[in-house]
């Protein structure tokens, strides 16, 4: 559920007419709904009642400082993957000491920063990393809290580029080697064995792989609790969202109309399947959702530049491009595209929706049928709140786009559109090229 809907014929975010945002701040612009984020967070938290739960928002999905502050206010901790993200949590007023540091390639400098700032746990991906964290902690005279990431070898049945829990992925330590890894970790004087972690993939649309992975790892977790007194089990993120019927899925009526057997994954179903498996452990349970919390809480506003009628097909050229929203080019991802002004009297248009970049991959949708729109008119890419802005680049010297946060009838620019001057500020022409 979310708060993007037509009021009259105008697409709104909460009580704000999105056209007003485009008018004031231009396009392309990401727009986020604070209420949707809060609803998603609270709904997930209340789906796993009875557990000692700590939700660590996977901030790589959307790390705007305003979004992070909103999460901090909701009581969330964070799942972070770099020194930069750690600094963002601190800058947003978040609690780093309840946050976890993940990622396969932590540098010495990042480990040092995390130890100095304080984190809840380092999520360790390899044996050399154990040695490095121990070494840095020793230098600082500290003990580093760690959890080892277990790769349960479960197929998440999602896109290959976002599957992480199979034995041929680069992530984690295979379950059969995990006991030895913990035994090795226990020998390091500057490590504190605090938990276990796993994360099997992203955009999972069924609860089955989650339940399978948790069931597979739980006996081992219980064993570790006995052996080392670990206190937490992090089951990662990965809950999928609706992309296909994104706009309609904002309403309860849409969910009620889905046949029981085909009902997409809900936090309630996730909680119902996992809570009974996790409760007997008597451990703190960490969740690391990213996409579920913010994905349907954001859209990308864009304006039509041209309708190019070709011999074989039509091309709707819009002002957003693959550098602003890379998911379609990178994962063949689907984003629903809707007009800001609905007009049922208009004919449908079938077109490829493309950006201005000089790459055939700069295509958001092929042969998409949507309400006819023309030059200068506004459209929205739905479900763009996760892995949208954070994956953006400056390719084609297109500056990073603006971001706006909506709350009720208020909205505020939370990130300015990047100027040409800022884009080239770090570049310089060396002396030996001067005339
Ligand atoms: C990316 C990631 C997440 C979040 O995944 P979502 O699919 O966005 O929920 C959680 N944990 C780890 C370790 C990750 O790498």
Image (cartoon, rainbow, N blue to C red):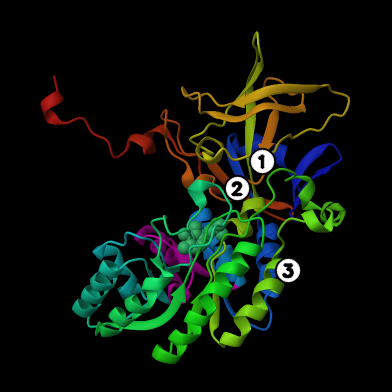
- Mark number, residue 404: 2
Residue that label 3 marks: 268
* Circle 1 or circle 3, nearest the eye: 3
| Residue 66: % across, % down | 55, 58
* Circle 3 or circle 2, nearest the eye: 3
Between disc 1 and disc 3, whose residue precedes? 1
Which image quarter: residue 141? bottom left
User: 419 or 337: which is nearer to us?
Assistant: 337
**Image quarter hosting the N terminus:** bottom right
Identify the secondary structure beneath mark 3.
helix
- Classed neighbour count for the residue bearing mark 3: other residues with Cα under 10 Å, few (<14), some (14–19), many (≥20): some
> Can the viewer see residue 55?
no
Between disc 1 and disc 2, whose residue precedes? 1
Could you give the CA–CA distance between mark 1 and mark 2, rounded to whole angstroms?
A: 8 Å
Residue that label 1 marks: 21
> Can the viewer see residue 273?
yes
Q: Residue at the location (55% across, 63% down)? A: 237
User: 254 or 19: which is nearer to us?
Assistant: 254
Q: Residue most toward the left?
A: 432
User: 183 or 418: which is nearer to us?
Assistant: 183
Left or right side of 93 for 138: left
Which image quarter: residue 51? bottom right
Magenta-drawn stretch contains 351: no
Q: Which residue range is magenta in the image? A: 75-100
**Image quarter hosting the C terminus:** top left
């Amino acid at each position: 559920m979310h708060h993007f809907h037509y009021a009259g014929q105008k697409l709104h975010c909460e009580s704000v007419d999105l056209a007003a945002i485009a008018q004031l701040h231009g396009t392309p612009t990401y727009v986020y709904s604070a209420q949707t984020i809060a609803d998603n967070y609270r709904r997930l938290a209340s789906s796993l009642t009875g557990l000692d739960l700590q939700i660590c928002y996977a901030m790589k999905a959307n790390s705007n400082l305003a979004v992070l502050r909103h999460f901090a206010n909701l009581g969330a901790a964070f799942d972070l993957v770099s020194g930069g993200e750690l600094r963002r949590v601190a800058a947003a007023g978040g609690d780093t000491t309840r946050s976890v540091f993940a990622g396969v390639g932590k540098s010495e400098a990042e480990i040092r920063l995390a130890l100095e700032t304080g984190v809840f746990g380092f999520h360790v991906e390899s044996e050399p990393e154990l040695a490095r964290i121990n070494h840095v902690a020793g230098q600082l005279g500290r003990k580093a809290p760690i959890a080892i990431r277990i790769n349960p070898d479960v197929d998440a049945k999602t896109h290959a580029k976002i599957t992480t829990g199979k034995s041929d992925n680069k992530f984690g330590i295979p379950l059969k080697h995990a006991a030895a890894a913990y035994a090795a970790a226990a020998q390091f004087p500057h490590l504190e064995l605090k938990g276990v972690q796993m994360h099997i993939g992203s955009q999972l649309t069924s609860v089955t792989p989650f339940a399978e992975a948790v069931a597979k790892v739980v006996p081992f977790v219980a064993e570790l609790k006995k052996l080392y007194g670990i206190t937490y089990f992090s089951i990662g993120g990965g809950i999928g969202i609706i992309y296909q019927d994104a706009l309609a899925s904002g309403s309860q009526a849409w969910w009620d109309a889905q046949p029981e057997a085909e009902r997409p994954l809900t936090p309630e179903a996730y909680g119902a399947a996992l809570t009974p498996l996790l409760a007997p452990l008597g451990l703190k349970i960490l969740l690391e959702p990213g996409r579920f919390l913010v994905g349907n809480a954001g859209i990308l506003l864009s304006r039509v530049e041209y309708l190019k009628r070709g011999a074989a097909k039509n091309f709707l050229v819009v002002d957003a491009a693959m550098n602003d929203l890379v998911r379609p080019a990178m994962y063949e991802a689907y984003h629903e595209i809707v007009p800001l002004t609905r007009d049922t009297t208009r004919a449908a248009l079938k077109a490829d929706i493309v950006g201005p970049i000089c790459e055939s991959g700069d295509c958001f949708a092929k042969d998409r049928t949507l309400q006819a729109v023309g030059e200068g008119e506004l459209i929205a890419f739905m479900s763009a709140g996760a892995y949208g802005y954070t994956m953006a680049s400056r390719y084609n010297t297109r500056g990073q786009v603006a971001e706006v946060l909506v709350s009720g009838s208020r909205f505020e620019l939370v990130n300015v559109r990047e100027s040409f001057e800022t884009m080239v500020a770090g570049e310089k022409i060396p002396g030996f090229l001067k005339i």
